[in-house]
């Protein structure tokens, strides 16, 4: 590999891994709707909506609190965290108090403007269900 190509790759990797859109102390409020969940037998069999608040302890780590609402089932309080290993990608861990459930997930976000972002994510619940969700979030800097 040429030295100039190696330099370009190194610069891109540094920019890619360090250019998070949020900063320490930022707050993000968001909401999402399950588009598809493996325990649904029919389209619109049940609906699940979530609202979350994320507080960024570090640029790439936030703690999460929120509420999940189902048309059938228990409402749940959410406690969890998000980790952003690279810009636009996050992993999340959530405990759902009320449904007595835990989920691991991953997602992708894309800026709509300086404060609004679109998020798409997938969650694996420990009871075995998989869900795909889309939503929007507002970032207070």
Image (tube, rainbow, N blue to C red):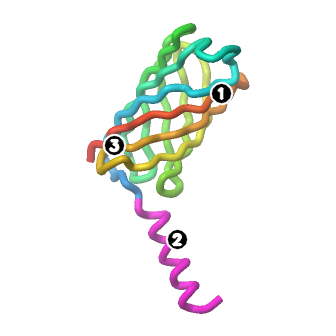
Q: Could you tell me how far apart the alpha carbons at marks 1 and 3 are, in whole angstroms?
A: 27 Å
The disc, 1 or 2, on the residue closer to the chain's N-terminal end is: 2
Q: Secondary structure at mark 3?
A: strand
Mark 2 burial class by Cα count in 10 Å: few <14, some 14-19, many 20+:
few
Residue at (57, 84) in percent of width and height: 6
Residue 41 location, x and y as percent? Answer: 70, 14
Q: Residues at badges 1 and 3 in contact (C-beta under 8 Å)?
A: no
Q: Secondary structure at mark 2?
A: helix
The disc, 3 or 2, on the residue closer to the chain's N-terminal end is: 2
Please provide the residue range marked out in magenta: 1-19
Above or below residue 132? Residue 16 is below
Q: Nearer the viewer, mark 1 or mark 3?
A: 3
Instruction: Identify the disc placed on residue 116.
Output: 3
Q: Which residue is mark 1?
A: 125
Would residue 84 be counted in the magenta stretch? no
Specify the principal SS of the magenta part: helix
Q: Secondary structure at mark 1?
A: strand
In-image side of 99 versus 64 (left or right): right
Residue at (39, 49) in percent of width and height: 111
Above or below residue 88? Residue 65 is above
In-image side of 114 versus 19 (left or right): left
Q: Nearer the viewer, residue 43 or 57?
A: 43
Residue 32 location, x and y as percent? Answer: 46, 29
Mark 1 burial class by Cα count in 10 Å: few <14, some 14-19, many 20+:
some
Residue 67 location, x and y as percent? Answer: 44, 21
Q: Which residue is mark 2?
A: 13
In-image side of 71 versus 56 (left or right): right
Above or below residue 133? Residue 43 is above
Question: Where on the picture, by quarter, is residue 126?
Answer: top right
Above or below residue 24? Residue 12 is below
């Amino acid at each position: 590999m040429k030295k100039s190509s190696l330099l370009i790759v190194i610069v891109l990797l540094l920019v890619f891994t360090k250019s998070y859109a949020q900063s320490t102390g930022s707050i993000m409020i968001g909401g999402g709707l399950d588009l598809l969940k493996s325990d649904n037998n029919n389209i619109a069999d049940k609906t699940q909506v979530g609202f979350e608040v994320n507080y960024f302890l570090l640029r790439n780590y936030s703690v999460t609190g929120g509420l999940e609402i189902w048309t059938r089932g228990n409402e749940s309080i959410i406690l969890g965290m998000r980790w952003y290993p690279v810009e636009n990608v996050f992993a999340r861990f959530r405990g759902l108090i009320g449904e007595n459930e835990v989920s691991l997930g991953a997602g992708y976000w894309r800026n709509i403007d300086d404060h609004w972002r679109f998020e798409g994510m997938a969650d694996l619940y420990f009871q075995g269900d998989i869900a795909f969700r889309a939503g929007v979030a507002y970032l207070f800097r």
